[in-house]
Image (cartoon, helix red, strand yellow):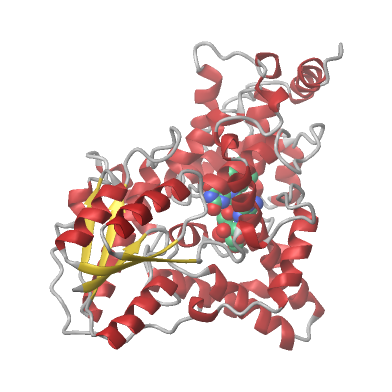
Protein backbone atom coordinates (compact mmCIF):
# COMPACT_ATOMS: atom_id res chain seq x y z
CA UNK A 1 0.00 0.00 0.00
CA UNK A 2 1.13 3.58 -0.69
CA UNK A 3 0.07 7.16 -1.40
CA UNK A 4 0.46 8.34 -4.97
CA UNK A 5 1.10 12.04 -5.67
CA UNK A 6 0.14 13.04 -9.18
CA UNK A 7 2.35 15.99 -10.21
CA UNK A 8 0.84 18.35 -12.74
CA UNK A 9 1.59 22.08 -12.87
CA UNK A 10 3.43 21.88 -9.53
CA UNK A 11 6.89 20.57 -10.39
CA UNK A 12 8.42 21.31 -6.98
CA UNK A 13 8.76 19.75 -3.55
CA UNK A 14 8.50 22.88 -1.38
CA UNK A 15 5.15 24.63 -0.78
CA UNK A 16 3.39 21.78 -2.56
CA UNK A 17 0.09 21.09 -0.74
CA UNK A 18 -0.60 17.66 -2.30
CA UNK A 19 2.94 16.44 -1.60
CA UNK A 20 3.04 17.97 1.89
CA UNK A 21 -0.21 16.23 2.87
CA UNK A 22 0.88 12.93 1.31
CA UNK A 23 4.08 13.01 3.36
CA UNK A 24 2.16 13.88 6.53
CA UNK A 25 -0.50 11.19 5.99
CA UNK A 26 2.16 8.73 4.89
CA UNK A 27 3.89 9.16 8.25
CA UNK A 28 0.64 8.72 10.20
CA UNK A 29 -0.55 5.74 8.17
CA UNK A 30 2.93 4.29 7.65
CA UNK A 31 2.56 4.37 3.88
CA UNK A 32 5.35 5.18 1.42
CA UNK A 33 4.88 8.09 -1.00
CA UNK A 34 5.27 7.61 -4.75
CA UNK A 35 5.10 10.28 -7.46
CA UNK A 36 3.77 10.23 -11.03
CA UNK A 37 3.72 12.70 -13.91
CA UNK A 38 1.51 11.99 -16.94
CA UNK A 39 2.24 13.81 -20.19
CA UNK A 40 -0.61 14.48 -22.59
CA UNK A 41 0.91 15.19 -26.05
CA UNK A 42 -2.39 16.28 -27.61
CA UNK A 43 -2.96 19.13 -25.15
CA UNK A 44 -6.35 20.84 -25.12
CA UNK A 45 -8.60 22.06 -27.97
CA UNK A 46 -5.87 22.08 -30.64
CA UNK A 47 -3.19 23.49 -28.35
CA UNK A 48 -0.69 20.60 -28.19
CA UNK A 49 2.34 21.61 -26.08
CA UNK A 50 4.75 23.74 -28.11
CA UNK A 51 8.37 22.86 -28.86
CA UNK A 52 10.08 25.37 -26.54
CA UNK A 53 7.74 24.58 -23.68
CA UNK A 54 8.37 20.83 -24.13
CA UNK A 55 12.10 21.48 -23.81
CA UNK A 56 11.51 23.36 -20.57
CA UNK A 57 9.24 20.59 -19.27
CA UNK A 58 11.85 17.95 -20.11
CA UNK A 59 14.47 19.76 -18.06
CA UNK A 60 12.09 20.57 -15.23
CA UNK A 61 11.00 16.94 -14.90
CA UNK A 62 14.62 15.78 -14.74
CA UNK A 63 15.17 18.23 -11.92
CA UNK A 64 12.02 17.15 -10.04
CA UNK A 65 12.91 13.49 -10.46
CA UNK A 66 16.35 14.09 -8.92
CA UNK A 67 14.85 16.10 -6.03
CA UNK A 68 12.29 13.41 -5.27
CA UNK A 69 14.91 10.65 -5.55
CA UNK A 70 16.98 12.45 -2.90
CA UNK A 71 13.91 12.26 -0.63
CA UNK A 72 13.48 8.55 -1.37
CA UNK A 73 10.39 9.15 -3.56
CA UNK A 74 10.33 7.53 -7.02
CA UNK A 75 8.74 9.49 -9.89
CA UNK A 76 6.89 7.42 -12.49
CA UNK A 77 6.49 8.97 -15.92
CA UNK A 78 3.53 8.20 -18.17
CA UNK A 79 2.49 9.34 -21.62
CA UNK A 80 -0.97 9.44 -23.28
CA UNK A 81 -4.36 8.84 -21.73
CA UNK A 82 -3.79 10.69 -18.48
CA UNK A 83 -6.79 9.48 -16.49
CA UNK A 84 -6.29 5.83 -17.51
CA UNK A 85 -2.55 6.06 -16.73
CA UNK A 86 -3.20 7.35 -13.23
CA UNK A 87 -5.88 4.78 -12.50
CA UNK A 88 -3.79 1.89 -13.87
CA UNK A 89 -0.66 2.96 -11.96
CA UNK A 90 -2.61 3.40 -8.72
CA UNK A 91 -3.87 -0.16 -9.08
CA UNK A 92 -0.56 -1.58 -10.12
CA UNK A 93 1.18 -0.01 -7.10
CA UNK A 94 -1.74 -0.94 -4.83
CA UNK A 95 -2.16 2.69 -3.77
CA UNK A 96 -4.62 3.47 -1.02
CA UNK A 97 -4.82 7.15 -1.88
CA UNK A 98 -4.02 9.51 -4.77
CA UNK A 99 -3.38 13.22 -4.08
CA UNK A 100 -3.01 16.05 -6.58
CA UNK A 101 -3.20 19.82 -7.04
CA UNK A 102 -5.93 21.10 -9.33
CA UNK A 103 -5.10 22.95 -12.57
CA UNK A 104 -7.45 25.83 -13.45
CA UNK A 105 -7.44 25.47 -17.23
CA UNK A 106 -9.93 24.32 -19.88
CA UNK A 107 -10.28 20.57 -20.10
CA UNK A 108 -8.56 19.93 -16.78
CA UNK A 109 -11.74 19.74 -14.71
CA UNK A 110 -12.94 16.90 -16.97
CA UNK A 111 -9.63 15.07 -16.48
CA UNK A 112 -9.91 15.56 -12.71
CA UNK A 113 -13.47 14.24 -12.72
CA UNK A 114 -12.51 11.18 -14.79
CA UNK A 115 -9.60 10.33 -12.48
CA UNK A 116 -11.68 11.01 -9.38
CA UNK A 117 -14.49 8.79 -10.62
CA UNK A 118 -12.29 5.88 -11.70
CA UNK A 119 -10.42 5.90 -8.37
CA UNK A 120 -13.47 6.07 -6.11
CA UNK A 121 -15.15 3.29 -8.07
CA UNK A 122 -12.30 0.99 -7.18
CA UNK A 123 -12.04 2.03 -3.54
CA UNK A 124 -9.03 4.38 -3.83
CA UNK A 125 -9.32 7.69 -1.98
CA UNK A 126 -8.64 10.79 -4.14
CA UNK A 127 -7.75 14.12 -2.49
CA UNK A 128 -7.57 17.32 -4.47
CA UNK A 129 -5.81 20.54 -3.35
CA UNK A 130 -5.77 24.16 -4.51
CA UNK A 131 -2.49 25.53 -5.77
CA UNK A 132 -2.62 26.94 -9.30
CA UNK A 133 -4.16 30.32 -8.38
CA UNK A 134 -4.09 32.56 -5.33
CA UNK A 135 -7.88 32.30 -5.26
CA UNK A 136 -9.81 29.60 -7.07
CA UNK A 137 -12.51 30.84 -9.49
CA UNK A 138 -15.33 29.79 -7.17
CA UNK A 139 -13.76 31.89 -4.37
CA UNK A 140 -14.04 35.11 -6.33
CA UNK A 141 -17.35 36.01 -7.91
CA UNK A 142 -19.31 39.20 -8.45
CA UNK A 143 -22.33 39.88 -6.26
CA UNK A 144 -24.62 38.24 -8.86
CA UNK A 145 -22.50 35.06 -8.90
CA UNK A 146 -20.92 35.73 -12.30
CA UNK A 147 -17.18 36.00 -12.85
CA UNK A 148 -15.33 39.31 -13.17
CA UNK A 149 -14.71 40.67 -16.64
CA UNK A 150 -12.81 43.81 -15.73
CA UNK A 151 -9.39 43.62 -14.12
CA UNK A 152 -9.54 46.60 -11.73
CA UNK A 153 -12.58 45.48 -9.68
CA UNK A 154 -11.35 41.87 -9.94
CA UNK A 155 -8.00 42.70 -8.38
CA UNK A 156 -9.49 45.11 -5.83
CA UNK A 157 -11.80 42.39 -4.52
CA UNK A 158 -9.10 39.72 -4.74
CA UNK A 159 -6.73 41.93 -2.73
CA UNK A 160 -9.37 42.43 -0.03
CA UNK A 161 -9.87 38.66 0.31
CA UNK A 162 -6.15 37.97 0.16
CA UNK A 163 -5.45 40.43 2.98
CA UNK A 164 -6.67 37.82 5.45
CA UNK A 165 -5.74 34.73 3.43
CA UNK A 166 -4.30 31.76 5.25
CA UNK A 167 -2.38 29.70 2.73
CA UNK A 168 -1.94 26.83 5.21
CA UNK A 169 -0.24 23.82 3.61
CA UNK A 170 0.42 25.88 0.51
CA UNK A 171 3.40 27.27 2.41
CA UNK A 172 5.07 24.02 3.39
CA UNK A 173 8.82 23.83 4.07
CA UNK A 174 11.05 21.58 1.98
CA UNK A 175 10.36 17.99 3.07
CA UNK A 176 12.98 15.87 4.81
CA UNK A 177 14.07 12.56 3.22
CA UNK A 178 11.52 9.77 3.81
CA UNK A 179 13.76 6.89 2.82
CA UNK A 180 17.18 6.15 1.43
CA UNK A 181 18.02 8.22 -1.69
CA UNK A 182 17.11 6.43 -4.91
CA UNK A 183 19.06 5.95 -8.10
CA UNK A 184 17.50 7.84 -11.02
CA UNK A 185 17.31 6.16 -14.39
CA UNK A 186 18.71 8.98 -16.57
CA UNK A 187 16.83 7.69 -19.61
CA UNK A 188 13.38 7.66 -18.08
CA UNK A 189 12.38 11.25 -19.03
CA UNK A 190 13.53 10.48 -22.59
CA UNK A 191 10.65 8.01 -22.81
CA UNK A 192 8.17 10.89 -22.78
CA UNK A 193 9.51 12.03 -26.16
CA UNK A 194 9.37 15.72 -25.28
CA UNK A 195 12.31 16.89 -27.37
CA UNK A 196 12.42 17.40 -31.13
CA UNK A 197 14.93 15.20 -32.96
CA UNK A 198 16.84 18.24 -34.24
CA UNK A 199 18.73 19.74 -31.28
CA UNK A 200 17.66 23.35 -32.02
CA UNK A 201 16.82 23.71 -28.35
CA UNK A 202 20.52 23.60 -27.34
CA UNK A 203 20.47 27.43 -27.55
CA UNK A 204 17.85 27.61 -24.79
CA UNK A 205 20.17 25.92 -22.29
CA UNK A 206 22.22 29.06 -21.77
CA UNK A 207 19.19 31.21 -20.92
CA UNK A 208 17.28 29.03 -18.43
CA UNK A 209 17.83 26.79 -15.39
CA UNK A 210 14.58 24.80 -15.24
CA UNK A 211 13.64 23.26 -11.92
CA UNK A 212 12.71 24.40 -8.43
CA UNK A 213 16.26 25.34 -7.38
CA UNK A 214 16.69 27.62 -10.42
CA UNK A 215 13.27 29.21 -9.82
CA UNK A 216 13.99 29.88 -6.15
CA UNK A 217 17.39 31.36 -6.97
CA UNK A 218 15.81 33.59 -9.59
CA UNK A 219 13.10 34.70 -7.17
CA UNK A 220 15.56 35.32 -4.32
CA UNK A 221 17.76 37.46 -6.56
CA UNK A 222 14.82 39.48 -7.91
CA UNK A 223 13.09 39.85 -4.54
CA UNK A 224 16.35 40.91 -2.88
CA UNK A 225 17.12 43.62 -5.42
CA UNK A 226 15.23 44.50 -8.62
CA UNK A 227 11.72 44.32 -7.15
CA UNK A 228 12.11 47.73 -5.47
CA UNK A 229 12.59 49.37 -8.89
CA UNK A 230 10.04 47.22 -10.70
CA UNK A 231 7.57 50.06 -11.18
CA UNK A 232 10.05 52.14 -13.18
CA UNK A 233 12.12 49.40 -14.86
CA UNK A 234 9.51 46.83 -15.85
CA UNK A 235 8.73 48.52 -19.17
CA UNK A 236 12.32 48.87 -20.36
CA UNK A 237 13.20 45.77 -22.38
CA UNK A 238 16.92 46.57 -22.38
CA UNK A 239 17.07 46.35 -18.57
CA UNK A 240 16.80 43.28 -16.35
CA UNK A 241 13.80 44.88 -14.63
CA UNK A 242 11.38 41.94 -14.48
CA UNK A 243 11.57 38.62 -12.68
CA UNK A 244 11.57 36.28 -15.75
CA UNK A 245 9.71 33.79 -13.61
CA UNK A 246 6.92 33.13 -16.12
CA UNK A 247 8.04 29.60 -17.13
CA UNK A 248 8.67 28.72 -13.47
CA UNK A 249 5.18 29.96 -12.58
CA UNK A 250 3.62 28.13 -15.50
CA UNK A 251 5.14 24.78 -14.51
CA UNK A 252 4.71 25.43 -10.82
CA UNK A 253 8.41 25.30 -9.97
CA UNK A 254 7.65 28.07 -7.53
CA UNK A 255 4.45 28.66 -5.61
CA UNK A 256 2.49 31.79 -6.44
CA UNK A 257 1.17 31.71 -2.87
CA UNK A 258 4.77 31.84 -1.55
CA UNK A 259 5.57 34.81 -3.80
CA UNK A 260 2.40 36.64 -2.76
CA UNK A 261 2.97 35.97 0.95
CA UNK A 262 6.57 37.23 0.83
CA UNK A 263 5.56 40.38 -1.02
CA UNK A 264 2.70 41.04 1.42
CA UNK A 265 5.02 40.59 4.41
CA UNK A 266 7.55 42.97 2.94
CA UNK A 267 4.88 45.55 2.16
CA UNK A 268 3.94 45.59 5.82
CA UNK A 269 7.46 46.65 6.86
CA UNK A 270 8.72 48.59 3.82
CA UNK A 271 8.94 52.33 4.44
CA UNK A 272 10.12 53.63 1.05
CA UNK A 273 7.11 54.78 -0.96
CA UNK A 274 8.86 53.90 -4.24
CA UNK A 275 9.58 50.36 -3.09
CA UNK A 276 6.02 49.95 -1.85
CA UNK A 277 4.64 51.10 -5.21
CA UNK A 278 6.92 48.64 -6.99
CA UNK A 279 5.89 45.70 -4.80
CA UNK A 280 2.23 46.60 -5.29
CA UNK A 281 2.80 46.75 -9.03
CA UNK A 282 4.47 43.34 -8.99
CA UNK A 283 1.53 41.92 -7.04
CA UNK A 284 -0.87 43.34 -9.60
CA UNK A 285 1.07 41.54 -12.38
CA UNK A 286 0.55 38.32 -10.45
CA UNK A 287 -3.05 39.56 -10.41
CA UNK A 288 -3.12 39.59 -14.23
CA UNK A 289 -1.95 35.98 -14.21
CA UNK A 290 -4.77 35.25 -11.81
CA UNK A 291 -7.32 37.21 -13.86
CA UNK A 292 -6.38 35.32 -17.04
CA UNK A 293 -7.11 32.03 -15.29
CA UNK A 294 -10.47 33.20 -14.00
CA UNK A 295 -11.48 34.58 -17.42
CA UNK A 296 -10.57 31.40 -19.31
CA UNK A 297 -12.23 29.26 -16.66
CA UNK A 298 -15.47 31.19 -17.21
CA UNK A 299 -15.08 31.30 -21.02
CA UNK A 300 -13.13 28.22 -22.20
CA UNK A 301 -14.45 28.84 -25.73
CA UNK A 302 -12.20 31.92 -25.88
CA UNK A 303 -9.19 29.66 -26.46
CA UNK A 304 -10.04 29.66 -30.13
CA UNK A 305 -12.71 32.32 -30.50
CA UNK A 306 -12.71 36.02 -29.75
CA UNK A 307 -14.45 36.95 -26.54
CA UNK A 308 -16.13 39.65 -28.59
CA UNK A 309 -17.54 37.45 -31.33
CA UNK A 310 -17.76 40.29 -33.85
CA UNK A 311 -13.98 39.96 -34.21
CA UNK A 312 -14.37 36.49 -35.71
CA UNK A 313 -16.00 37.93 -38.82
CA UNK A 314 -13.68 37.62 -41.85
CA UNK A 315 -14.07 41.37 -42.58
CA UNK A 316 -12.29 42.11 -39.30
CA UNK A 317 -9.01 40.78 -40.73
CA UNK A 318 -6.84 41.12 -43.83
CA UNK A 319 -6.25 38.04 -46.02
CA UNK A 320 -2.67 36.74 -46.26
CA UNK A 321 -3.14 33.98 -48.87
CA UNK A 322 0.51 32.99 -49.33
CA UNK A 323 1.40 33.52 -45.64
CA UNK A 324 4.16 35.95 -46.66
CA UNK A 325 3.25 38.71 -44.22
CA UNK A 326 2.86 36.30 -41.31
CA UNK A 327 6.29 34.82 -42.11
CA UNK A 328 7.92 38.25 -42.21
CA UNK A 329 6.56 38.89 -38.71
CA UNK A 330 7.58 35.46 -37.39
CA UNK A 331 11.10 35.79 -38.77
CA UNK A 332 11.64 39.32 -37.49
CA UNK A 333 11.77 40.80 -40.99
CA UNK A 334 9.09 43.49 -40.70
CA UNK A 335 11.57 46.36 -40.90
CA UNK A 336 10.39 47.77 -37.54
CA UNK A 337 13.39 47.44 -35.27
CA UNK A 338 11.61 46.91 -31.94
CA UNK A 339 9.32 44.27 -33.45
CA UNK A 340 12.14 42.46 -35.22
CA UNK A 341 14.33 42.55 -32.10
CA UNK A 342 11.46 41.04 -30.08
CA UNK A 343 10.89 38.26 -32.57
CA UNK A 344 14.63 37.48 -32.54
CA UNK A 345 14.70 37.46 -28.75
CA UNK A 346 11.79 35.02 -28.82
CA UNK A 347 13.50 32.75 -31.34
CA UNK A 348 16.82 32.73 -29.51
CA UNK A 349 15.66 32.54 -25.90
CA UNK A 350 12.05 31.28 -25.89
CA UNK A 351 10.96 34.46 -24.10
CA UNK A 352 10.07 38.06 -24.94
CA UNK A 353 9.74 41.12 -22.75
CA UNK A 354 6.11 42.03 -21.96
CA UNK A 355 6.28 45.54 -23.47
CA UNK A 356 7.63 44.06 -26.70
CA UNK A 357 4.99 41.28 -26.68
CA UNK A 358 2.37 44.04 -26.74
CA UNK A 359 4.07 45.90 -29.58
CA UNK A 360 4.61 42.84 -31.81
CA UNK A 361 1.05 41.63 -31.16
CA UNK A 362 -0.34 45.05 -32.05
CA UNK A 363 1.60 45.21 -35.33
CA UNK A 364 0.38 41.74 -36.32
CA UNK A 365 -3.28 42.14 -35.42
CA UNK A 366 -3.83 45.81 -36.24
CA UNK A 367 -1.34 47.05 -38.88
CA UNK A 368 -0.82 43.74 -40.68
CA UNK A 369 -4.40 42.71 -39.91
CA UNK A 370 -3.77 39.01 -39.20
CA UNK A 371 -6.06 37.20 -36.77
CA UNK A 372 -4.76 37.09 -33.17
CA UNK A 373 -5.00 33.27 -33.20
CA UNK A 374 -2.09 33.05 -35.68
CA UNK A 375 0.11 35.10 -33.39
CA UNK A 376 -1.04 33.18 -30.33
CA UNK A 377 -0.09 29.89 -32.03
CA UNK A 378 3.36 31.19 -32.94
CA UNK A 379 3.94 32.33 -29.36
CA UNK A 380 2.59 29.02 -28.13
CA UNK A 381 5.18 27.07 -30.09
CA UNK A 382 8.15 29.32 -29.38
CA UNK A 383 7.70 30.53 -25.78
CA UNK A 384 9.15 28.55 -22.88
CA UNK A 385 6.43 30.16 -20.74
CA UNK A 386 3.53 29.39 -23.13
CA UNK A 387 0.49 29.39 -20.92
CA UNK A 388 -3.06 29.03 -22.22
CA UNK A 389 -4.74 31.62 -19.97
CA UNK A 390 -2.02 34.32 -20.14
CA UNK A 391 -1.43 33.87 -23.86
CA UNK A 392 -5.12 33.93 -24.75
CA UNK A 393 -5.83 36.96 -22.58
CA UNK A 394 -2.67 38.76 -23.77
CA UNK A 395 -3.50 38.35 -27.45
CA UNK A 396 -7.16 39.21 -27.11
CA UNK A 397 -6.32 42.21 -24.94
CA UNK A 398 -3.97 43.64 -27.57
CA UNK A 399 -6.27 42.75 -30.50
CA UNK A 400 -9.05 44.63 -28.72
CA UNK A 401 -11.47 41.72 -28.71
CA UNK A 402 -10.94 40.45 -25.18
CA UNK A 403 -12.52 41.12 -21.87
CA UNK A 404 -11.41 44.48 -20.48
CA UNK A 405 -9.32 44.90 -23.66
CA UNK A 406 -7.33 47.95 -24.66
CA UNK A 407 -9.61 50.28 -26.69
CA UNK A 408 -9.35 49.31 -30.36
CA UNK A 409 -7.93 52.67 -31.43
CA UNK A 410 -4.92 52.13 -29.14
CA UNK A 411 -2.65 50.87 -31.89
CA UNK A 412 0.93 50.79 -30.66
CA UNK A 413 3.28 52.69 -32.94
CA UNK A 414 6.44 50.51 -32.95
CA UNK A 415 8.66 53.47 -33.70
CA UNK A 416 7.48 55.73 -30.89
CA UNK A 417 7.38 52.72 -28.54
CA UNK A 418 11.04 52.03 -29.41
CA UNK A 419 12.02 55.65 -28.73
CA UNK A 420 10.20 55.67 -25.43
CA UNK A 421 11.14 52.26 -24.04
CA UNK A 422 14.50 51.60 -25.71
CA UNK A 423 15.92 55.12 -26.05
CA UNK A 424 19.58 53.99 -25.96
CA UNK A 425 18.94 51.14 -28.44
CA UNK A 426 20.30 48.61 -25.91
CA UNK A 427 17.61 46.07 -26.57
CA UNK A 428 17.51 46.48 -30.32
CA UNK A 429 21.32 46.38 -30.69
CA UNK A 430 21.47 43.25 -28.57
CA UNK A 431 19.07 41.33 -30.80
CA UNK A 432 19.63 42.89 -34.20
CA UNK A 433 23.33 43.82 -34.18
CA UNK A 434 24.48 46.48 -36.64
CA UNK A 435 23.68 44.68 -39.92
CA UNK A 436 21.48 45.96 -42.73
CA UNK A 437 17.79 45.99 -41.92
CA UNK A 438 14.89 45.43 -44.31
CA UNK A 439 12.72 48.41 -45.25
CA UNK A 440 9.45 48.67 -43.28
CA UNK A 441 6.93 46.20 -44.71
CA UNK A 442 4.07 48.70 -44.45
CA UNK A 443 3.17 52.31 -43.92
CA UNK A 444 2.25 52.76 -40.27
CA UNK A 445 -0.15 55.64 -40.82
CA UNK A 446 -2.02 54.07 -43.74
CA UNK A 447 -2.25 50.62 -42.09
CA UNK A 448 -3.51 52.21 -38.88
CA UNK A 449 -6.25 53.90 -40.90
CA UNK A 450 -7.11 50.58 -42.59
CA UNK A 451 -7.35 48.89 -39.19
CA UNK A 452 -9.73 51.57 -37.96
CA UNK A 453 -11.82 51.16 -41.13
CA UNK A 454 -12.04 47.38 -40.67
CA UNK A 455 -13.11 48.05 -37.12
CA UNK A 456 -15.85 50.45 -38.21
CA UNK A 457 -17.17 48.10 -40.91
CA UNK A 458 -16.80 44.67 -39.32
CA UNK A 459 -17.23 45.48 -35.69
CA UNK A 460 -19.41 48.53 -35.59
CA UNK A 461 -21.32 47.67 -38.77
CA UNK A 462 -20.83 51.23 -40.11
CA UNK A 463 -19.20 52.59 -43.23
CA UNK A 464 -15.75 54.02 -42.54
C1 LIG B 1 0.43 38.92 -26.57
C2 LIG B 1 0.86 38.42 -25.19
C3 LIG B 1 1.05 37.07 -24.97
C4 LIG B 1 1.45 36.62 -23.71
N1 LIG B 1 1.65 35.26 -23.52
C5 LIG B 1 2.02 34.81 -22.30
C6 LIG B 1 2.23 33.42 -22.08
O1 LIG B 1 2.03 32.57 -22.95
N2 LIG B 1 2.66 33.03 -20.83
C7 LIG B 1 2.87 33.93 -19.82
O2 LIG B 1 3.25 33.53 -18.71
N3 LIG B 1 2.63 35.24 -20.00
C8 LIG B 1 2.24 35.72 -21.21
N4 LIG B 1 2.04 37.06 -21.39
C9 LIG B 1 2.13 37.97 -20.22
C10 LIG B 1 3.52 38.59 -19.95
O3 LIG B 1 4.07 39.10 -21.13
C11 LIG B 1 4.50 37.60 -19.33
O4 LIG B 1 3.91 36.94 -18.25
C12 LIG B 1 5.76 38.33 -18.82
O5 LIG B 1 6.38 39.01 -19.87
C13 LIG B 1 6.70 37.32 -18.21
O6 LIG B 1 7.88 37.93 -17.83
P1 LIG B 1 8.31 38.04 -16.31
O7 LIG B 1 8.19 36.69 -15.66
O8 LIG B 1 9.62 38.70 -16.26
O9 LIG B 1 7.18 38.98 -15.75
P2 LIG B 1 7.11 39.92 -14.43
O10 LIG B 1 6.95 41.29 -14.92
O11 LIG B 1 8.25 39.65 -13.54
O12 LIG B 1 5.77 39.48 -13.75
C14 LIG B 1 5.69 38.41 -12.78
C15 LIG B 1 4.70 37.37 -13.23
O13 LIG B 1 3.39 37.93 -13.34
C16 LIG B 1 2.68 37.29 -14.40
N5 LIG B 1 2.34 38.30 -15.41
C17 LIG B 1 2.99 39.45 -15.67
N6 LIG B 1 2.35 40.14 -16.64
C18 LIG B 1 1.28 39.40 -17.00
C19 LIG B 1 0.22 39.57 -17.95
N7 LIG B 1 0.13 40.67 -18.71
N8 LIG B 1 -0.71 38.58 -18.07
C20 LIG B 1 -0.65 37.48 -17.30
N9 LIG B 1 0.32 37.27 -16.37
C21 LIG B 1 1.27 38.21 -16.23
C22 LIG B 1 3.62 36.26 -15.00
O14 LIG B 1 3.35 35.01 -14.42
C23 LIG B 1 4.99 36.79 -14.60
O15 LIG B 1 5.98 35.79 -14.53
C24 LIG B 1 1.64 37.54 -22.65
C25 LIG B 1 1.43 38.91 -22.89
C26 LIG B 1 1.06 39.34 -24.15
C27 LIG B 1 0.86 40.82 -24.38
Q: Is residue 203 left or right of residue 432?
A: left
- Give the residue drawn at x 64%, y 47%: 295
Question: Does residue 357 appear anywhere in the picture?
Answer: no
- Give the residue drawn at x 39%, y 41%: 43
Question: Does residue 397 appear anywhere in the picture?
Answer: yes
Relative to 346, is 220 above or below? Answer: below
Q: Image quadrant for the N terminus?
A: bottom left
Where residue 281 sits in the image (x, y, percent)? 72, 66
Count of numbered marks: 0
Question: Which residue occupies the foreground of this view, 126 or 355?
Answer: 126
Relative to 399, is 174 above or below? Answer: below
Among the 4 quarters of the image, the one containing residue 42: top left
Where residue 402 sits in the image (x, y, percent)? 70, 38
Q: Is residue 269 left or right of residue 1?
A: right
Where residue 183 sits in the image (x, y, percent)? 13, 73
- Give the residue drawn at x 76%, y 44%: 404
Question: Which residue occupies the foreground of this view, 34 or 42?
Answer: 34
Relative to 339, is 445 above or below? Answer: above
Q: Is residue 464 left or right of residue 105?
A: right
Question: Which residue occupies the foreground of this view, 8 or 121?
Answer: 121
Among the 4 quarters of the image, the one containing residue 410: top right
Where residue 133 sits in the image (x, y, percent)? 56, 62
- Give the residue drawn at x 48%, y 47%: 386
Q: Image quadrant for the C terminus?
A: top right
Amino acid sequence: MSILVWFRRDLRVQDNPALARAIKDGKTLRLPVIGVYAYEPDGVAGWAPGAASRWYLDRSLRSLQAQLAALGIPLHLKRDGVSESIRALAHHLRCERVYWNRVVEPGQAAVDDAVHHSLTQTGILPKVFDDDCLLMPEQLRRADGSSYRVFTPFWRRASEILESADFGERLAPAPKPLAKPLEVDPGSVDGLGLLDAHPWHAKLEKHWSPGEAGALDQWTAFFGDAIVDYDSDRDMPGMPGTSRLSPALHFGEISVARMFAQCAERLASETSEGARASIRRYLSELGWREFSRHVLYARPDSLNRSLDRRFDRPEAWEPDPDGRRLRAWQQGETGFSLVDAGMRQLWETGWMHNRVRMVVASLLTKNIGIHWREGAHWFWDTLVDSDLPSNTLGWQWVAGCGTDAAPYYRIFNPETQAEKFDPQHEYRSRWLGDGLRPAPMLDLKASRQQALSRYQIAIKGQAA
